[in-house]
Image (cartoon, coloured by chain):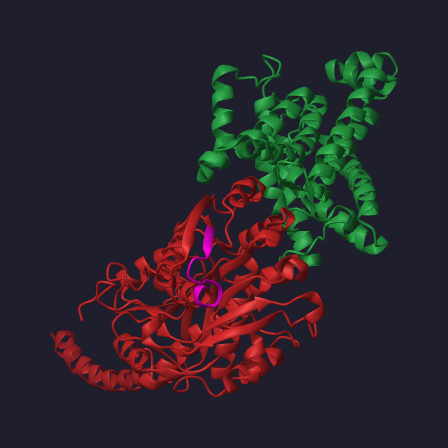
Chain colours: A red, B green
Amino acid sequence: MRKSGSIPKISRRTALAGLSASAALLAMPRLGRAADETIRIGFPTPLTGPFAAEARDQVKCAELAVKLVNDKGGIGGRKVELLVRDDKLNAGEAATRTLELIEKDKVHAVVGALSSAVQLAVNEVTRARGVIYVSISQSDTINEAKDFSKYTFHEALNPHMTTAAVARQTLKKGTKVAHLVADYAYGHEMLRGFKRAQAAIGADNVGEILHPFGAADYSTFMPRLMSMRPDVLCISNFGRDQANAIKQAVDFGVKQQMKIVVPVILHNQRLAVGPDVFEGVVGGANYYWGLETQSKSAASFNAAFKAANGGAIPTDYGAYGYSGVGSLLAAMQAAGGTDTDKVVDALEKLQYDLTKGPQHYRKCDHQSVQSVLVLESKKKSAMANDNDLFAILANDTGSDDMLRSCSELGHAT
Amino acid sequence: MDLSLIIMQLLSGIALGAVLVITALGLTIVFGMLGVVNFAHGALFMIGAYAGLYLASLTGSFWWGLLLAPVLIGAFGMLIEFVLIRRLYGRSIDDPLLLTFGLSYILVEGVRIVFGSDGIPFPTPSQLIGVLDLGIGFFPRYRLFVIALVAVVLLVLWLTLEKTRIGLIVRAGARDPTIMQVLGVDISRVWLAIFGLGVGLAALGGVLAGPMRSVNPEMGSLVLAEAFVVTVIGGLGSIVGAVVAGLMVGISISLVALFAPEMATIVMFALMAIVLLIRPQGLFGVRGRTA
């Protein structure tokens, strides 16, 4: 009885004391923890395989964006951490890594993926979990209503934008155009973009050849391409495929007969095969370091990258890593934290200029409206130094006109 | 579709097949004589391309690279046999397979550390730049050179194996190593030389492929798969098989590329499946010999 009588008494006291103490204890570290709990950004990218060179540049630039924010004291006092994962250029691998990033590493958002097929797999996962995903891979479908969600943002250019800009520079009414296309999402979307642009200009399609993705030898496609006798050959493939296809086309004397055009001209592939092979090839780009003479933000991005990477210059696909992570962090800054809805809201309102001029995410489909460059690969003798790769033929300012309309993409307007 | 286009397409297929033949040959010789399935063959092909490029830039001439890289990498192959492979003779076939598989990873990572994972430009030798007018169309000089060089290498190899004393020892050693030892031949030296030859051929394939494809650390993995397909179609261990199957695969890829380009890579595997259904030992394989 005494025992039972005393217990509640003590208990009440202990409970009261305990409650207030533990409340204080809980509150203190909790405030402390909230203040220094790092903001984690998941970054799946194909570190191994044929796009490895581009992927590595993306990581360097993404890390730079994180470093710059951390140097300024982070976001609301919280440091930012980048969690890089190798997606091995495989949709299944990317989905698994992304799920791990969300479930195990508790990331606050995901940025990344380079291949269009892989980005759709990442998007599936992030969409289902309600995690923000800023895609930095070229795609035409991620903004379409069926793949889109309010968590999906697309920082990269899309095939529609680059092919239209390239076609405007290289095609005229009556130009005969042949296509060599990688047989997967990227190639198909680029081909669709070119054909749409061709139709608008009045150029004629003389034939198209689909090649297997990742082929090492393109020689077997060349005799037929030559027999089509086009004025322009559009080669729509990516990474090492681009380097190999252009090299072998040049070996077969294609350039004597026609002009070679690519939807996206890649800095690293130009370096990998040399100036003689790429001479005169025209292609679209999101970024080129040479823009620094025209753009203040390009100059400061180049300078920051050089300082962090021993004097190296940033590349096109690298710049995506910077602007993708950079725009997300800017939105978190504006939203005052990582609350998903607030960050989505902030991203939709964001006006940012990180690498080349003003950009913003279009409200209906979250596509980044931005400028498109058209570059021509320089002759060896015209290069001022080893980094002087391209001449800028055009710098089309970003506008809604260069995108497919929201109703066309299936969004309610 | 006119005749000249088909002939050009055939020629592309032969040039493609020539590289396949030279690479598959090394793989099949090592298997035929040593019973070793060399999974590092693709990595050694890649090392050959890098060595060729390095030696060419060192000497200022592609030709020195082409001559020295196979010899040097062949010698490196002999070192591998002497230090690693030799210990595994007589054990099950999986042991050397796993060893060479691991070795290929080490070689690829090593190259990545030294030369980086980006490709390196491998310029076509200046004498062979451009196209030759064949009357019916233009064909790259370099690819014609590859066809000719592979033909010469095959001829020399065949003459050595069929007409010389060394060739006799090698052929006999493949059939019955014990008797050879009883007869006083140091069979381990023969095996050393054979492995070196196989690796040297992989390296030669790599140097030849260099100016056609970009040179990068992963270039060997695709080639390894192709070389295995060719070896299986031709019959494991058969030299004639490797030559016939290599050309067959090259030509089929090329002709399929003409009519159904997106199927160009798959045709190689379809061909392998058909051959295996009809002749499980491969076109020129010996029945009862399994890998």
Q: Quadrant of the C terminus of chain B?
A: top right
Magenta residues span A167-178
Q: Is residue B44 visible?
A: no
Whether residue B35 appears in magenta in the rendering, the answer is no
User: What residue is shown at x 75% (from left), y 13% (from top)?
Assistant: B176
Q: Is residue A373 above or below residue A299?
A: above
Q: Is residue A79 above or below residue B143?
A: below
Residue A247 percent across, percent down from the top left: 62, 52
Residue A274 percent across, percent down from the top left: 67, 60
Instruction: Return the residue found at the far front.
Output: A174
Residue B160 percent across, percent down from the top left: 82, 22
Q: Is residue A28 visible?
A: yes
Whether residue A171 appears in magenta in the rendering, the answer is yes
A235 horizontally vs B7: left or right: left
The picture quadrant where one finds residue A144 is bottom left
Q: How many badges with numbers are in the image?
A: 0
A73 horizontally vs B73: left or right: left
Q: Nearer the viewer, residue A138 or B186?
A: A138
User: What residue is shown at x 75% (from left), y 27% (from top)?
Assistant: B154
